[in-house]
Image: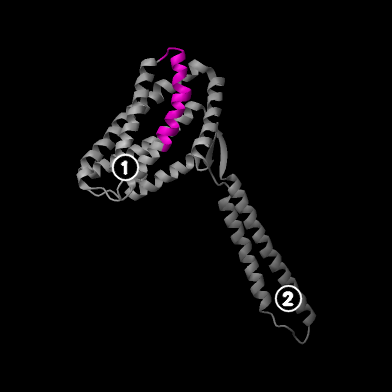
Amino acid sequence: MKRSSLFSPIGNFSRTTIGFFGGIANKILKSATSLPKRVADGSKIRKKVLIGSGIFGVSALGSLYGIKRATKKKEEESEEIDVDLSAPEDLMREHGVLERLLLIYEECARRLEANITVPSGVIGKTARIARSFVENYHEKLEEQFIFPEFSKENTLTDMVSILENHHEAGRGVTDRILSLSSGRTLPETSYKELSSACTEYVRMYRPHMAREDTELFPALYALLGSEGVKKMGESFEKEEHRLLGEKGFKGVVKEIASIEKQLEIQDLAAVTPAPVPS
């Protein structure tokens, strides 16, 4: 299954090259335009120098423009590369999205418990992403493709049953969060109930993801073999295009990053523990 990865291998070289030739072109044009139009002796030479310099300058600038356009096109082409992901890897990557949603809920619950205002719309936006990406896309993949394989082979069925119950319960919690956060502002009377709902969602989905990542998904290879897992991944890719549209996985990640900035929890370095004084 193919997914995107970012890199820009020629950016620094291109900027250095353009800067170098740009400097040469500017110097030549300045010196050329400063020459007198005519002199008593050697006027033809001066005129030739002027004409030659002008042509070289125009050519150099034209070349620079071409370099810039080619560089920009090359960077756009090389911005994404195709990476093959298996079905379990894809699901685990989506768990990363869910974990970031849980971090947002966790921060919102902390603020609500302390009677600290949460930025307008944050909880509602987070719940809508949970509904569209987690519940209507990620969990549907599991319910349509993953869980039936274990049921057919009578493997890990108790776990699968609990995981399915989690999905249903999670949708109920999301309904509550959406209802409580539907107004333009959050009334203080809803703080406690909303905090409780966010905490419930976090508390359930962390062990849910951990069991799937460490027990359920790895077991797929024993059930389907490598070829079967690969085919399942191809089905996932089709479902992603159908359900998520053009924005895809990356678009969802961008939306989450925007919410993290609103809460000022986007700085990864900020969670690093301070060194213990010696």
Rendered location of residue 97, percent (x, y): 41, 37
In the rendered view, how is the structure colored? Answer: one colour
> SS at mark 1?
helix
Q: Quadrant of residue 20?
A: bottom right
Determine the main secondary structure of the stretch shown in magenta. helix
Let me know if residue 101 is in the magenta part.
Answer: no
CA gap, disc 1 and disc 2: 63 Å
In the rendered image, is residue 15 in sight?
yes
At 55% from the left edge and 47% from the top edge, which residue is drawn?
8
The segment highlighted magenta reads: 132-155
Q: Nearer the viewer, residue 148 or 22?
A: 148
Quadrant where the C terminus is found in the figure: top left
Identify which amino acid the numbered label 1 is placed on: Val
At 44% from the left edge and 26% from the top edge, which residue is drawn?
142
Judged from this view, the residue extending furthest toward the bottom is 40
At 44% from the left edge and 31% from the top edge, which residue is drawn?
138
Q: Which mark is residue 271?
A: 1
Identify which amino acid the numbered label 2 is placed on: Leu
Q: Residues within 10 Å of mark 1 (few under 14, many from 20)?
A: few
Q: Which mark is residue 50?
A: 2
